[in-house]
Image: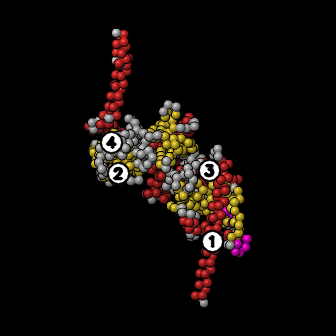
Amino acid sequence: MLGFETVVGLLLPSWEELQLSVAAAAFLIVAYWFLTLGDGVDRTLVETSAGAEMDDDEKEMDQSKGDLHSNSAYLIKSLFQVKLLAAKNLRGANLNGTSDPYAIISCGAEKCFSSMVPGSRNPIWREGFNFAVDELPVKIIVTIYGWDIIRRSAVLGSVTIPVEHEGRTGAIWYTLDGASGQVCLHIKTHKLQVDSSRVLDGCSGANTQRKAFADQEPMVFHQKHGPLQTIFNLLSDEIVEHSYSCALERSFLYHGRIYISAWNICFHSNVFSKQIKVTVPFGDIDEIKRSRHAIINPAITVILRVGAGGHGVPPLGNGDGKVRYKFASFWNRNHVLRNLQHAVQKYHTMFEAEKKEREPSTLLDFIKEKQQPALLYFVKEKKMPTLPAHSSSSFRGSESQSNISEEFVAKIEQFQPFIKEEVLTRIYNDVFPCTAEQFFKFVLDDGSTFTNEYHTARKDFNLIVSQWHASSEYNGQVRDVKYRTLCNFPLCPPDIPVTELQHTFLSADKKNLVFETVQQTEGVPFASYFEAHCRWSVETVSESSCTVDITFGAYFKKWCLLQSKIKSAAVDDNKKVYKIRLDAARSYITKSRTSNIASSSAVTQENN
């Protein structure tokens, strides 16, 4: 009997085991419903909730309309909001038959990213995007992509929607031009009198205003290009104020670098040759706060305003309609957070100051349009005094600029150095069969083809050579040379972008030529830490010869562990590179001089 009870006890589960089994079964049922049935939510919920959401949108747009009418200088614009509600029956781009869809909404040159919904063929977004255009009609292009961790995102379908007049469309399903799928949108449009100095909430507001201010008058200086120009194609006067190593949270952490300027937060990553570029204007940021990735990884979350949309890659979604980007893996999260918050505060302070600075010119512009010169002269006589010198130079008034520039020019006694002389080391010295003036004409002049032929022989491509132009910062002329070159280093992509800033100065007697370069690369290890500085000193020694002395060095903008090794390796490698370059220049000069002599002889014979 005792043996029978023992066998039964071994075969039948105990009461505790039954309780554990029931709890585990209940958990699996709930998880299955959440992952499978939850994705198939009745789409009527979208239309049902759309009405309430549109009422809220109407209140928001009416509020913005009232705010805009309270300002002074107006432009008539059409403001419309695209509400991305949902999509259904999308093509499965993943191996398991699902997709990770996100949308890009384009209107003209402006482009906004929605958040990415993981593992769904029937995503629900309920996100809005604001656009401001000068006039109707316009076309809205909505393209649905499937996010891929490593490869390029796959296109799941797109649709082009014309907006021809004001009003609202309601929630409408549009059929995508792909294999299958539909997207549900709500579009509302109305005209507003927009204050020209106001930043509109939305993806086009901050960037449009930044470009408008920069286009008010030409730049009076030439800023060296940095990562903001070479990677993100931002304006030349925008410089990096802070830079930190971090990671962007997506399907996994994409490690890269975040750059903070006076106008934007930029992030760049190149993991497995997948380029990720994010540019978030400060005008689109609603809040920056502490957060965490996992449990032990402190992070920073940048929350964007409603209607702003993402910039560069799909952001993280949220139920309140505000998308966000999360950055993690900082060395010192609190230090970065303080600098970000300070940069946002500085941006808003600068914007308000510039707005007040531009207000006095409104009356003058009105008088100019009415062509009343006598009254215009009177107003100029009574005009406010010139603003102090510490005001931002991005959008100074033309008259105050002329007053400041005269004083500024009078005080300038010497120009800034183009390169760091303390890092230079002599790598080449030889005699060339030409004068310093002829060296510039044959090798460096805008009319010379040497630069194109040299880079073609090196198998470089996408070469862009700007024209020489006078510089107010450096004595002489400057230009930019951009190209992509092949890279055989194992940790680099197959080809990398290179930007070479060039400066030249020819003495008054044309016997001495200085040619300086600052080379910046992207995509190689520690590329953001240093620049390659080089100087060519050309001196005429006779009527048909000159000496060429080349010095080179690696200038480190910040310290790194392998600094000494990188310096020595850079000098050794560039000794070979510049020897090949100068041999090519010698051959080109000889060939050009021979061609010129032959041409002169032919002309002489014809005259005789």
Marks 1 and 3 close (CB-CB < 8 Å): no
Dot 3 amino acid type: Phe
Dot 2 alpha-carbon crowd within 10 angstroms: few under 14, some 14 to 19, many 20 or more = some
Q: Is residue 198 visible?
A: no
* Residue at the disc numbered 1: 587
Q: Which mark is residue 121?
A: 4
Q: Say which of marks 4 and 2 sits in front.
A: 4
Label 4 vs label 2: CA separation? 20 Å
Q: Nearer the viewer, residue 583 or 513?
A: 583
SS under mark 3: strand
Q: Which mark is residue 141?
A: 2
Q: Position of residue 588 (x, y in %)?
A: 61, 71
Q: Residue at x 66, y 49 (%)?
A: 565
Q: Earlier in the sequence, mark 4 or mark 1?
A: 4
Most common secondary structure along the magenta stretch: strand
Position of residue 196 measured from the top left corner of the image (x, y, whole percent): 44, 49
Reading the image, the residue beneath label 3 is 530
Q: Earlier in the sequence, mark 4 or mark 2?
A: 4
Q: Position of residue 101 (x, y in %)?
A: 37, 44
Decide whether residue 60 is among the magenta residues.
no
Q: Residue flagged by tag 1: what amino acid is it?
A: Ser
Badge 3 crowding class, 10 Å Cα cut-off, few under 14, some 14 to 19, many 20 or more, is: many
Label 4, secondary structure: give it: loop
Image quadrant in which the N terminus is located: top left
Nearest the viewer among 50 and 3 is 3
Front residue of this view, candidates 434 and 417: 434
Circle 1 residues within 10 Å: few <14, some 14–19, many ≥20: few
- CB atoms of marks 4 and 3 within 8 Å: no
Tell me the distance, in whole angstroms, between the alpha carbons under discs 4 and 1. Answer: 63 Å
Residue 455, placed above or below residue 343: below
Sequence-first disc among 1 and 2: 2
Residues drawn in magenta: 535-545
